[in-house]
Image (cartoon, rainbow, N blue to C red):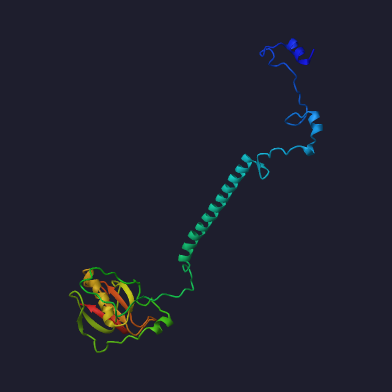
Amino acid sequence: MDRRQHALETYGTDPETNRFSGIEVVNNTPEKYYVSPEYDQKFPASERPPSAPKNKICGLSRPIFFLTIALSALAILVVGLGAGLGVALSKVQASPSNMNADDGNANAPRVDPLTLSSAVDTSASSPTSTPATTSTDTTATTTSSSTSSSRPKPSNICPSADNSVIKGTVGDVRYRVACDSDFTGSGKETLASFFAETWDNCLKLCNTMNYFQERTDVGCTWNVAGTGQQTPGTCWCLGGADKELVANVGNVAAVPL
C-alpha cells in the first residue's frame, strides 16, 4: 500500500476533519523561518542568495530616523530663536545707556546759554513765541573760553543811547535805555537768558514776551562787557513790577514805561 492510500484510510477525505491533520514543523531555532537540515546541507549559507535588505536608514529604523531628524530641526530652531532674542535684548538695553551716556559726567563741558544771532526776528504774523532757556540769577551763567573767543565782540550802544526812549518792533510798550545799569530786587522775575550779538536782538526777544503774553513789565539787561564772568553779549529778559534799577557798569538796561 502506498503512502497516499494509507493516509486516506487513516485520516479520511473530509477537509473539515483534516484541517489540522498532517505533518507539523516545529522550529526550535532562533531564525524567523525554519530551515530544514537538508536545505542547509544542499545550500550552505555562503552560497545562498542574498536576503532582502532590511528597512533601515543609516542603521536606524525608519521611525527612529525620522524622529531624530525632527528633534534635530526643533533644537536648531530653538537655538536660533534664543540667539535672535538675545541680540535684540542687548540692543534694547544698549540704546538707553547710549542716550544717557553723558548723564552724571562731572567733567562734561558746560553748555552756553541759548544762542540767538541776528537771524532772530519776530513779526505780528508769528502768533506763537516761547521764552529761551530760563535762569535764576544774572551772575550764575558762565561760558567756556573756547566758545566765547569764537563769538564776535558785541558793540556797546552807550553812552550815546543813554536815557533815550525806544519802542519795540511789535506792540505799544516803550522802553527807556539806561547805560551801566541792571535790575535787582525781590520782585525781579528772570524769564530767559541767551546770547545776543546786538542790543536790538536782546530787546526784540524780551519785547515779544510783553506782546504775546499781554504784559508790560518785562524789561531786559544786556551784559555787553561780560561782567560777573558772563559771556559778553548775554541778554536777560526780566519781569516783575517791583524790580528796581541799580548801577552796574558794563550793562545796558531797557526799562519798560
Q: Nearer the viewer, residue 180 or 43?
A: 43
Q: Nearer the viewer, residue 152 or 65?
A: 65
Residue 226: x %, y % from top left:
36, 83
**In this picture, residue 222 sits left or right of residue 49:** left
Give the residue drawn at x 55%, y 50%.
77
Residue 240: x %, y % from top left:
26, 71
On-image quarter of the N terminus: top right
**Residue lying furthest right:** 41
**In this picture, residue 220 sits left or right of residue 71:** left
Q: Which of 35 and 119 is in front in this view?
A: 35
| Residue 241 in sight from this viewpoint | no
Q: Which of 255 and 152 is in front in this view?
A: 152
Q: Please state the total of marks drawn on the protein image.
A: 0
Give the residue drawn at x 57%, y 51%.
76
**In this picture, residue 48 sits left or right of residue 143:** right
| Residue 46 in sight from this viewpoint | yes
**In this picture, residue 23 sits left or right of residue 80:** right
On-image quarter of the C terminus: bottom left
Residue 99: x %, y % from top left:
45, 65
Q: Find residue 6 and report its image quarter.
A: top right
**Residue lying furthest front:** 1
**Residue lying furthest left:** 172
Give the residue drawn at x 28%, y 74%.
238
Residue 243: x %, y % from top left:
27, 74
**Residue lying furthest bottom:** 160
Please determine whether, in this image, residue 51 is positioned above or below residue 12. Answer: below
Q: Find residue 125 and report its image quarter.
A: bottom left
